[in-house]
Each structure stands twice: as C-alpha cells, then as structure tokens.
Amino acid sequence: MAEAQLEANVRLQAGMAVIDLRGDIDGFAEAALIAAYLQADTKEPTAMALNFGEVDYINSTGIALIVGLLARARKNKRPVIAFGLSDHFAEIFEITRLSDFMRIVSDEAAALRGAAEEKSL
Amino acid sequence: MSTQIRDLWRILARSGGQSAPAAEPEASPASVEIAPYDPLVAYLQSARGVVEIDRLELDSAALRSLREGGVKLTVPLVAQGELIGLLNLGQRLSEQEYSVDDRALLSSLATQAAPALRVAQLVRQQKDQARRSERLEQELRIARLIQQTLLPRELPKLPGWEVAAYYRPAREVGGDFYDFIHLPDGKLVVIVADVTDKGVPAALVMATTRSVLHAAAESLISPSEVLARVNDQLIPNMPENMFVTCLYSVLDPLKRTFRFANAGHGLAFRRGVGGVSELKATGMPLGLMPDMRYEENEVVILPGETILLQSDGLAEAHNSRREMFGFPRVKQLLSDHPSGPAVLIATLVAELERFTAGGWEHEDDVTLLAIECSALGGKAAETARLAAPEVPLPLQAEFNIPSRPGNERLAIQRVSEAVQDLGLSSNRLEKLKTAVGEATMNAMEHGNKYQEDLPVHIRLRASLEKLSVFITDHGGGQRIPEAATPNLEAKLDGLQSPRGWGLFLIQNMVDDLKVTSDETYHTVELILHLEGGQHG
C-alpha cells in the first residue's frame, strides 16, 4: 500500500490558529503534524484548532501523535480545539479521553466561539 | 420369434385349417429359431400373402427348420415394415391342398393379426421392462437403506470446533460412507471411505467395513494400526475385484491435533495460515493385499483452520463435455472461498452443480466432511457458548497482508468489502475497521517484526449470531500483554510514551476479543455480535 500522506495547512482565524488536516493521521503523519504545530505556534494564537473535516483515517499511532501535539500545546498554554470530526472519531476521542483535554466542537464557527471562551477564562 | 411362431401355430390350427379338430394336431411344428440375418427374413419381409415353404429355394437354416417342423404354408406378419411373426400352417388334416379361399382368408387374417400381435408384443415388452425396473429399483432401495442406516444421524458437537457433512448418493448408489466415533478420552475418530462397485454389493461391503472399523477403533489408537488390522480382517471375505479406500483420522479437540492414515483414499486438504495444503499419507486400499502397512501423519490445526475430507465423487465428477472436476479445482475453491464448514461445503456443492450443469447425473456418491477449529482454546467456560449451533452466513474472505508499514489499510479495505452484505450499521462498520486496522498493525509490528516474508493472515467467518475476524501473525510463543487503559494524564505530562493505544482501542471497538497463541502463531479474534451486541 502506498504511504498515505497528510497535508497540514495553517491559517490564522480571528487569533485562532487553524490547522487544516487532509488525509490520514497515522505513523506517516508525524512530520507534517509537528511542522504544522510549530508553524501555528509561531503565530502566537489564542488557541489551536485542528480541523479534521477532511481526515479519513486516524489510527492508534495517529492518536499518539495527537497526544504529543496536545502535550506540547498544554506545555505552551495553548488551548486545543478539534472540529470536523466524524461521529466515529469523535467517539474515539471520547473513549481515549482526549475530549477531556481538548474541546470537541462541530465546526469552525463553534471552534472560534470556543477559542473566545478559552481566552476569557 | 420362436415363441411367436409356436403361438401362431395354435391360432391357425384352429382357424386356418377348416376341418381342424378341437384338439391340437399331434404333429405340432416345433419352435423355429430364425436368426436376424437369415435370408428367409429378408424374403418374408418383402413377400406378399401366403408363401409355400416347399417352393422356396433359399440357403436358409430357418427354412430347413420350418420344413422339418412340417410347415407347409407361412404368412408373414408385417407391421410398420417390420417382420414381427409368421402364421405357419402344417398339412391340412384332411390332407387336401389349401384352397384359393383358404389362402385369401389367411392373407386377410395376417393383415388383421399383425397390428394386434404388435400391440401384444409391445405390452409384453413393457411388462418385462417394468419387472426388470422394479427389481432394479428394489435393489437400489435396499442399497440406499443399508447406506442411510449406517451413516451418522447427527454431527458431533465439540466445543471450539465446527463440523459439517454432506452426502449425496449416486443414481446407482455407490459405496461411500463416513462415520464419527467418540473415544472415551474425548478424541473423535473421523472416517471417510469408499467401497468400489455400486448397489447392494457395495452397501454390504460398506456395512462390513464399518463394523470392522468400529471394532478396531475400540482397541487401537494409532490410525495406521487400525487400517492394518481392518485390512487383514477384510481380506478373507472381500468379493473379487472389490476393495475399500479409507481415510481414518483421530482428532484431539483439546490439543488440536489431527492424526491420520490413508488407505488409498482421495486427497484431504488443510486450509491454514499458509494456504491450502494436502494431507498426505500413503497406503494401499483395504481388502486388496494382506499384511499392508500404512503411513501415519499428524498436523496441528490452528484456530481458524479447516480440514476437508472427501470421497472422489466430487473431484472425479464429469460434465457433459467429459471434463473432470478435479482435485486442483477443489483445492482452488477451498482457497478462494474461505468460510465456515457449512458454507464451504455449500460452495463446493454449488460449484459441482454449476460444473455439471445441473441435469448431469452424478456418476458416484459425493461425500464431503469439513472440520474447523474456532479461535478458542479448551476453556470450559467458553465451550458451552461455542457448542451452540451456528448457521453460517455466506461470508467468504481470507487473505494475507505483507508485513509492511501502512498495510493495515489494505486489511481494512479487504475486510470492509467482505462484510458489506452483512448489513452492519455505519457505526459498527467504522469500529470494525478501526479494530481490524489496529490488530493488523500489532500483528505486523509485534508479531512479524515488519518482515515482509511473514504475512499477516486474515480470515473472516460469520454466523447468524456473530462475525469473527481472525488475525494471525507469526509471533507465537511471546508474552501477550494485557489490554490496559492508558494513563492519558501521564502521557500528556511526558511521563509515559504517547503511544500504547492499540489494544485499548481494539477492546473498545468490538464486542469481544480473544487471543490464542502457540509456539508459532498468535491469533486475535475480533468478534462483533450481530444481534445487538454491547456496542450495537
């Protein structure tokens, strides 16, 4: 099987860094994900928003990468918000308790509201 | 023909001879045999009306016989252009010549008698045929009765095992039989045999062989010793030109061993992790020669593996073009259509029907036995549920995945395709995909160390109650870690590796997870209950 690719593009949206993810989050995604995080972090965002709207696949290695990313963000006091997750991956985030440490919302607008709430805390 | 002539003489002695007395003449002509190619036949076939025997000049044995029998006149009885009899007349009792009126009357009588005689002949032929058919049918009924009486009434129920059997007699009833014998130590003897010849003789030899096999099984353990003894006991009473092929095996359901010896019987197959292989053991058929010795072999049946025993009725079936079904085709089907034993047998039978185009009459009995080891070991707590009868669904998938990073996606794709007809909800399907992906990753990474020449074997089986996906790697003999709930806080604080989610995810994606291992292989069985499991 050809190695899957993850595209991760960073943009700033009302002070929130949005990382648009496209593809698979598995062992091959590490470099792209870390690069995107580092790029987003340089923008001094109020929050990091991970857009999973075009993510097809997340495996346990991908979960581990997200945990690593979340650990970095927590260390840097960056709230992390996830949106665009399919029902299945939202359930996995519940099961793994990732949802205890990152807000799970439906879309980017909800993420912006969540980022605003994080800022006001 | 001779009977007809004799009967006709009687008719004419009364009606043709005007002054004939009521009693038959003393010099009644003897029966005359007329060979089909006797020139008299050709002559009479084309003759018209009354023929005077003494005036014929033919080199004919039949003609000489008629003359010697005192026949003076003969009138051919012809129906539909075929000579079907003769009206033969001897000398008139008055010793006068037959008159012109007599001859005209005889011709007229022959014209009317011929069709009536033809009808009578056909009725007689039909009755003879019916009697022969009835006798044959009666023999077939007896043969079938013997055979069916001796076949097992039910299949053995072994915890952790599934057994399916199929038997279809040929039109003429061959000598196939199969049998199961439960041994006191929990082992199961499985026998498939085939007696040469058909009908009652084969059925009787089958009954005898079965009895001798049972007696030997009670006192001997080794399959090769059993066959040797049975051979010696059958030799003295075996009818000429008859023999018995037999595959005798002993299944140990707890140790998962299958020990077997073969007396000239057709190939048995094992469908396992490494594909389909033949279970070979050499030996001569039973009842041919005394003092035979039989090779004996043993295999360990891994969870998810299947043994197929068969008579030659399937492999040696021919279609209308006289092509043979063949063992390679059986082997290929076994490889291409993996499924539970019942579905496997149904598939083979369906392929046989397709191959022989339905209407083709099967020349020989067809016997198929399939035995499959489920993923479980012998734990008593699990056995009761496993022993429950399952009706397999026609789910067929079995494949190998090279151990290469990222190839779990292949496994997910193949499993998704295989289960698409099971009607799983989107949620259940996604969970299954995740579980399959994780289990395959574990198998490739931990079991096979990402060695591409060590594939991960994946096999699916569905019943009405559950779907099982068996994922097997070469990591047997390793310690199997318990699935623990990861400590996310510790991971986020950098106190633990962020990894270690695989088993936890699998456990949360399926209704049940079973792990078995031996010295070589390690198998994970992912189970989804299909009627409202806990994750439904």
Image (spheres, grey):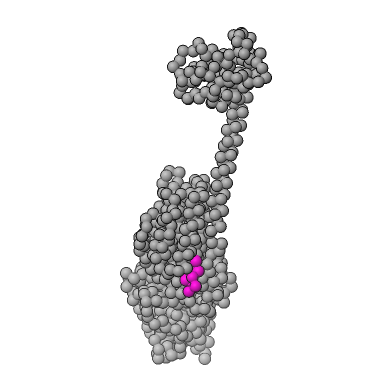
Image point (50%, 88%), residue name: A119
Residue segment shown in magenta:
B181-187
Look at the image and say whether residue B231 sits in the magenta stretch: no
Of A38 and B261, nearer the camera is: B261
Q: Indicate the position of residue B151 as horizontal and vertical percent values.
A: 53, 59
Q: Is A35 rendered above or below residue B116?
A: below
- The residue lying toward the viewer, choosing from B387 and B62, is B62
Residue A120 x %, y %: 52, 90
Magenta stretch encompasses residue B185? yes
Residue at 54% across, 71% down: B387
Q: Quadrant of residue A17?
A: bottom left
Which of the 4 image quadrants contains residue B7? top right
User: What is the x, y in percent for residue B526?
Assistant: 48, 74
Residue drawn where x is 50% and y is 11% of the image? B55
Tell me the quadrant of the picture where the N terminus of chain A can be found. Answer: bottom left
Along the line of sight, which residue is nearer the eye, B425 or B296?
B296
Give the residue displayed 47% in from the left and 48% down from the top.
B363
| Residue B297: image location, x then y, percent | 37, 66
